[in-house]
Structure formats: structure tokens, C-alpha cells
Amino acid sequence: MRILALLMIALLLISPAIGPACVDLPPVDEVGTTSTTDQYEPNGDLDTATPLVPGTALQSSIGSRVDYDVFRCDAPESSGLARFRVEVESERSENLEVEVGASIPGAFEGITWPGWKAKEDGDSIMVQGELTVGTVLVFISGTESVDYFIQIVWE
């Protein structure tokens, strides 16, 4: 028993020195998950949200159940309502949750506005809405690691 205890203490003392040499770990993003394919991390909150360029699809991924991706796109300058469509495509779209809201200057920020509900169709998830001023916010989470494409189109 005493020998086993001494072995455990010795392993605890030398493991920090040999651990990093034995394992090449991928980077850790801000919420503690690993991300090897998502070049937009960290983007788990409004301050680090990835900007969307209208009509341009981005490839991204959810690293795990605790990973959230946040995207943003300003409404185009216009004199009235601007219609938009957020499109998310994935071979495993059933494992993604997509919520869309807005940030309106001087008002508030919110997600899942009435009428801005995600509609699933095969490998696609789409949310349609309208906005006069402000920023569209897209929040994506998943039940497991999932790769996806996202884009916003203003009409």
C-alpha cells in the first residue's frame, strides 16, 4: 500500500512535465471547448460576434454542446423595412439550434423575435424577418459537434 501511494505521488509530480510533450491538443475557445475547424472562434457572445457579409456563405462549426456561435449583420440603410433571410446548411442540421434576434440602437437586444422562427427543410434551416434599423443577431448552438454553412441575404 505504501509503495502504491509513493507511485501515485511520483506520477502526480512528473505528469505536468511529460503531459504536454505527449499530447498535441487543439486550441481551447472561450467557453472551454476545443475547436479545430472553426476559424471564427472565439465568437460566443455579442462582443466577439462574427460579421456576416450579405450573400456570402461562411463555413463554421459547433465544437460541442457548450459551444455557441454568434453572428451579426447590420440592416442596410433604407427608408423602410428591409427583409432578410438567414440560411444555415448542414448535413446534420437536426443537431443545430438557430435563433435570430436583433439589436436596435437605443432600444434593446433580443433573440427569437415573434415571427422570426427557424424553419427546417432537409439539410437547411431558414429564418426570415424584417428590420428597419439595427443589427440582425444569429445564435447557433448544437447538441453535438456539427459543421455548417451560414449566410444572410437582404431582399
Image: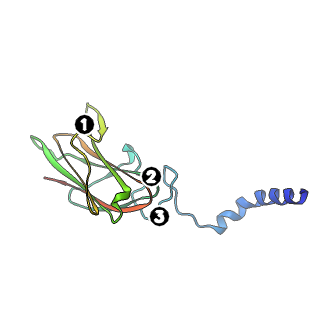
* Relative to 134, residue 121 above or below: below
Q: How far is disc 1 from disc 2 in space, using C-alphas? A: 25 Å
1 or 152: nearer the eye?
A: 1
Q: Residue at x 62, y 67 (%)?
A: 23
- On the image, numbered disc 3 is attached to which residue? 36
Upstream in sequence: badge 3 or badge 1: 3
Q: Secondary structure at mark 3?
A: loop
Kindly identify the residue that appears in the image at 33 percent across and 66 percent down.
Answer: 91
Q: Earlier in the sequence, mark 3 or mark 2?
A: 3
Q: Which mark identifies residue 68?
A: none
152 left or right of 15 in image: left
Q: Tags 1 and 2 in contact by the CB under 8 Å rule?
A: no
Q: Which residue is mark 1?
A: 104
Disc 3/disc 2 C-alpha distance (Å): 13 Å
Provide residue 39's location: percent of width, then percent of height.
40, 61
For label 1, the SS is loop
Foreground disc of the pair 1, 2:
2
Residue 133's x, y, as percent? 19, 39
| Label 3 to label 1: alpha-carbon separation | 34 Å
Residue nearer the viewer, 127 or 16: 127
Name the secondary structure under disc 2.
loop
Which residue sits furthest top?
A: 106
Three-letter amino acid code of the residue under disc 3: Thr
Amino acid identity at mark 2: Asp
Quarter-wise, where is residue 18 in the image? bottom right
Residue at mark 2: 67
Sequence-first disc among 1 and 2: 2
- Three-letter amino acid code at the position of disc 1: Ile
